[in-house]
């Protein structure tokens, strides 16, 4: 299989926060890979911006080290790296003050796409937009890329939308959710809408339930002070899990185009029922197996913030009435594993008798690790001795199906940045979508705050709180195992 790489138009991409963690780990290494594959054109340039006073040589040395750290040796070579770095510059700019802006303005070239990646703290998003506008750096064709978190609740998200709208049209604003850039997530849409097989069964009549799991092994790490004010519901559910739920539950858009897709996702969010208190389990990891506990990690012994949340969610529309969606996400769990599992109902009658106990078909969309899609089907166990059935996977792992190139799939960030340059907003969240997601999330959080609930404890390195098992057991179902 030879992949087709279509170069994008020449661009100037300014990465505000160019010395930060995200820029070093994801944005610059991702751009290197796009350059290596011929998608970033020779005339393209990247200008990193931050307050630190450093010359370009020092910045390039930092990025060389970052690429050597985050890109495997077999995917890089010295000449390509030199050629890439010659297109990378640095400009000291204060997002919050006046320093550096005329210098940045002077570096921008006419007649190329201008994109500005806001990889800085959210408190700086508004001042960056204002200064780009006031200094005449952004024009009507320019794009801004806004990182998460986009607000902390509906009111703050709306205020941020209004601030950005004062300087940029909605068609210029790219609110990034890197889950939408994952190859499998886009494949989910291909599987649903490019095949006749699944869509006729994609409703409450045939789907028993859906599980969406985003499990992490890491704790809060260096993000403790941010995370303790947010928790799993704000940090993961309002954005990533909600986006995955939308792609599973939405109606087929009339075309694979930005507003057609986003209109359908918005309808799903608006169809979500409020979550009943009994349909929520919150957890907080406790020290175990040599790992520290949450309270210690955030240096806040009184914290009631959840590092785990599981929810039973209902989409109240004709298609999904009666099919629950179970969502769970957490830190310090037993394995890093993100997947969506669509479990179909059992056949109405078994001609093989009752001993064929496990008759479910399950479509498993695996986001990480080992991206791929599996369909579990029933077949006959080989050999003589009668008709014994087994449930086996039909495996569509990219590495197996597409050869070595299937395994070397672009990281979500690099794909999404190329979409920004191409001017394609399909995989980015629209302002009204984000606000609607908060409008659903806010009462859930307000509910447990008003009840003064404490999260239940779970040992680090396990599958999460016992109570989360009950969320499914009482419905006669069980969570899939969290496995790498
Ligand atoms: P970080 O490591 O703290 O980096 C922040 C960057 O902002 C640095 O380059 C810093 O450089 C720059 N900066 C701070 N104040 C500035 C100012 N007044 N003017 C110009 N530059 C300024 O943060 P990060 O982890 O890279 O995160 C960046 C954004 O991405 C945040 O919104 C975060 O929520 C989001 N995000 C990050 C990750 C991740 O994995 N890291 C994941 C998802 C979302 P100077 O100090 O030199 O100015």
Image (tube, helix red, strand yellow):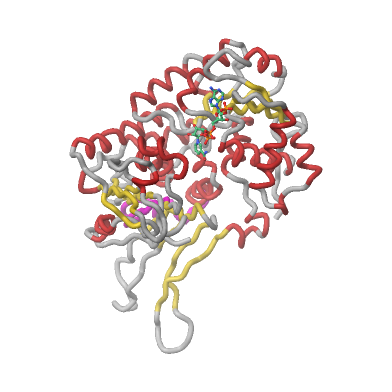
| Viewer-nearest residue: 437 or 216 | 216
Q: Does residue 364 appear left or right of residue 370 in this picture? A: left
- Residue 361 vs 322, above or below: the answer is below
Q: Does residue 279 appear left or right of residue 356 in this picture? A: left
| Residue 366 visible in the shown view | yes
Outermost residue, right direction? 79
| Residue 206 visible in the shown view | no
Q: What's the residue at 30%, 49% (across, down)?
A: 283
Position of residue 61 measured from the top left corner of the image (x, y, whole percent): 72, 36
| Viewer-nearest residue: 235 or 311 | 235
Does residue 200 belong to the magenta stretch? yes
Q: What's the residue at 40%, 42% (across, down)?
A: 236
Quadrant where the N terminus is found in the figure = bottom right
**Residue 439 image-quadrant placement:** top left
| Viewer-nearest residue: 359 or 17 | 17
Magenta-highlighted residues: 194-214
Position of residue 255 measured from the top left corner of the image (x, y, whole percent): 51, 37
Q: How many discs appear? A: 0
Q: Does residue 226 appear left or right of residue 314 in this picture? A: right
Q: What's the residue at 52%, 29% (across, down)?
A: 120
| Viewer-nearest residue: 55 or 191 | 55
Position of residue 111 measured from the top left corner of the image (x, y, whole percent): 72, 19
Does residue 220 belong to the magenta stretch? no
Outermost residue, left direction? 451
Position of residue 437 measured from the top left corner of the image (x, y, whole percent): 36, 34
């Amino acid at each position: 299989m030879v992949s087709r790489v279509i170069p994008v138009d020449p661009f100037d991409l300014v990465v505000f926060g160019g010395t930060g963690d995200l820029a070093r780990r994801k944005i610059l290494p991702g751009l290197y890979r796009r350059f290596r594959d011929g998608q970033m054109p020779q005339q393209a340039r990247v200008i990193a911006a931050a307050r630190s006073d450093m010359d370009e040589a020092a910045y390039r040395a930092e990025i060389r080290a970052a690429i050597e750290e985050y890109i495997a040796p077999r995917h890089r070579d010295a000449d390509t790296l030199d050629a890439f770095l010659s297109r990378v510059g640095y400009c000291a700019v204060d997002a919050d003050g006046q320093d550096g802006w005329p210098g940045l303005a002077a570096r921008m070239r006419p007649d190329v796409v201008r994109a500005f990646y806001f990889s800085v703290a959210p408190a700086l998003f508004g001042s960056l937009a204002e200064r780009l506008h006031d200094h005449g750096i952004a024009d009507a064709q320019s794009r801004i890329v806004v990182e998460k978190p986009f607000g902390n609740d509906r009111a703050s998200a709306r205020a941020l939308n209004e601030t950005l709208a004062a300087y940029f049209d909605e068609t210029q604003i790219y609110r990034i959710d890197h889950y939408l850039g994952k190859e499998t997530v886009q494949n989910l849409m291909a599987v649903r809408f490019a095949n006749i097989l699944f869509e006729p069964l994609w409703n409450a009549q045939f789907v028993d339930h859906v599980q969406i799991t985003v499990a992490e092994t890491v704790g809060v790490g260096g993000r403790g002070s941010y995370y303790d004010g947010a928790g799993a519901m704000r940090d993961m559910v309002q954005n990533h899990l909600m986006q995955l739920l939308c792609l599973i539950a939405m109606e087929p858009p009339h075309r694979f185009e930005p507003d057609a897709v986003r209109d359908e996702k918005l309808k799903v969010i608006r169809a979500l029922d409020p979550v009943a208190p009994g349909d929520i389990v919150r957890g907080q990891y406790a020290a175990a197996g040599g790992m520290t506990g949450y309270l210690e990690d955030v240096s806040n012994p009184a914290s009631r913030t959840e590092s785990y949340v599981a929810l039973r969610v209902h989409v109240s529309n004709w298609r999904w009435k009666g099919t629950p969606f179970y969502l769970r996400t957490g830190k310090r769990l037993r394995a890093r594993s993100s997947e969506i599992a669509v479990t179909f109902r059992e056949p109405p009658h078994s001609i093989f008798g009752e001993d064929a106990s496990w008759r479910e078909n399950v479509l498993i969309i695996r986001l990480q690790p080992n991206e791929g899609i599996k369909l579990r089907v029933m077949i006959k166990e080989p050999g003589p001795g009668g008709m014994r059935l087994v449930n086996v996977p039909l495996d569509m792992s990219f590495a197996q199906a597409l050869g070595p190139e299937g395994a070397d799939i672009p990281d979500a960030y690099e794909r999404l940045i190329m979409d920004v340059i191409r001017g394609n907003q399909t995989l980015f969240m629209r302002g009204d979508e984000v606000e609607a997601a908060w409008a659903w999330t806010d009462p859930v959080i307000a509910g447990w705050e008003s009840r003064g609930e404490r999260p239940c404890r779970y040992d680090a390195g396990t599958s999460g709180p016992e109570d989360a098992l009950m969320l499914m057991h009482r419905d006669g179902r069980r969570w899939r195992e969290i496995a790498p």
